[in-house]
Image (cartoon, rainbow, N blue to C red):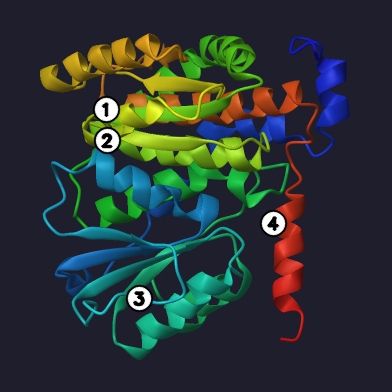
Amino acid sequence: MIDLDNPGELKRLDPKDVIGSTGMFVSQCRQIWELAQDLEFPEDYKACQNIVVCGMGGSAYGGYVASSLFKDQLKIPLVSINDYHLPAFVNGKTLAILSSYSGGTEEVLSCKAEASGNGLKVTGITSGGKLGDFFKSVGVPSLVFDPRFNPSGQPRLGTGYVVLGTIALLKKLKFLALSDEEVNKALDELEADLENIKQKAKNMSKKIFGAIPIIVSAEFLAGNAHILRNQFNETAKSFSAFSHLPELNHHLMEGLTNPTGKKLFVLFIDSDLYSDKLKKRVKLTQDVVGKNNISFDKYKPSGVGKLSQILNVLSFGGYLSLYTAFLYGQDPSVIPWVDYFKKQLEVGN
């Protein structure tokens, strides 16, 4: 097994510096938050009655986080769209947040065309490409950023840009009440805890190695489970799944019985900020998992507030999937099957 404390071994497996990008998560957050300070939206944007966040893969992360983190604040529906087409309910009172790190994601560009054709209010996040050109050509308030804190060049390693960028747009539109002081405090707390996060991720990766990770979370951390599943898939080249409490208590536990001989590892994303009912459910669910002879552990983020804990788990997940990739001897930057699929999709077009 590779030595995760040996920089030389890690460098051999990581020629594109994914570990460097992972360590720049806080810098990405600070950069995009500062960029958003100058945005000014027309008043009709602030009168929208629903929001669709259009994004694929890592570019969709902001919608997952925002809908769970701000469930108690958002007064209008927010729906994530991971498809070519917008839902039938959209109209001139809909805000479309178009999110594509590269600016060339075909599903997002398809949604962009439908949003423009149906009179939706549009904004978004991108590093450039066709989407960036669109924002500039029509003068739409948006976040077109320079990805200088992502040396790997991999869009899915730009998590800070996408997640905090989405939150920044919602704040500037006055759909959220979130102060700069809250954001800076959360980022300061994360920065101070970074070495601890990395060590915990190393230790957890050794427990997960060789098993299928099942991520369980609840309430404001629900979006993190979705993201961590994706990170295990792309970075570690590992099958993974996620489920949320309390919903999983009504079905998934019965599914732990068969087939026999399966090798699962359940990772509970816990929090002292969960409601009392959910805290009890976490403990009882762990009891059921253990009684089914399935290995499990928990990760409990530090941080005094929900935003701080969200960011902590995002950082932890980035390192956890990265160290798991190293244990499997994988180059964490490459996505050969995704690349193959895209090439085959282009055949005949």
Q: Which one is closest to the eye, mark 3 or mark 4?
A: 4
**Crowd rating for badge 4 (residues with CA inside 10 Å; few <14, some 14–19, many 20+):** few
**Disc 4, SS:** helix
> How far separated are the C-alphas under marks 1 and 4?
33 Å
Mark 4 and mark 3 in contact (Cβ < 8 Å)?
A: no
Give the Cα separation between the discs numbered 2 and 1.
28 Å
Going by the numbered disc 2, the residue's amino acid type is His
- How dense is the environment of label 2, judged by Cα within 10 Å: few (below 14), some, or many (20 and up)? few
Q: Residues within 10 Å of mark 3 (few under 14, many from 20)?
A: many
Judged by depth in the image, the label closer to the viewer, 2 or 4, is 2
**Residue 104 got which mark?**
none
What is the secondary structure assignment of the residue under circle 3? loop
Q: Earlier in the sequence, mark 1 or mark 4?
A: 1
CA distance separating discs 1 and 3: 30 Å
Disc 2 is placed on an element classified as loop
Distance between the Cα atoms at labels 2 and 3? 31 Å
Residue depicted at x 88% and y 27%: 12
For disc 1, the marked residue is: 306
Q: Give the residue type that dot 3 points to.
A: Leu
Disc 3 or 4, which lies upstream in sequence? 3
Counting from the top left corner in percent of width and height, residue 82 is at: 43, 63
Vertical position of residue 74 compared to residue 232: above or below: below
- Picture quarter containing residue 80? bottom left
In this rendering, does residue 307 appear at all?
no
Q: Amino acid at mark 1?
A: Lys
Check disc 3 and report the residue beneath it. Answer: 86
**From the viewer's perspective, is the residue at label 1 or at label 4 nearer?**
4
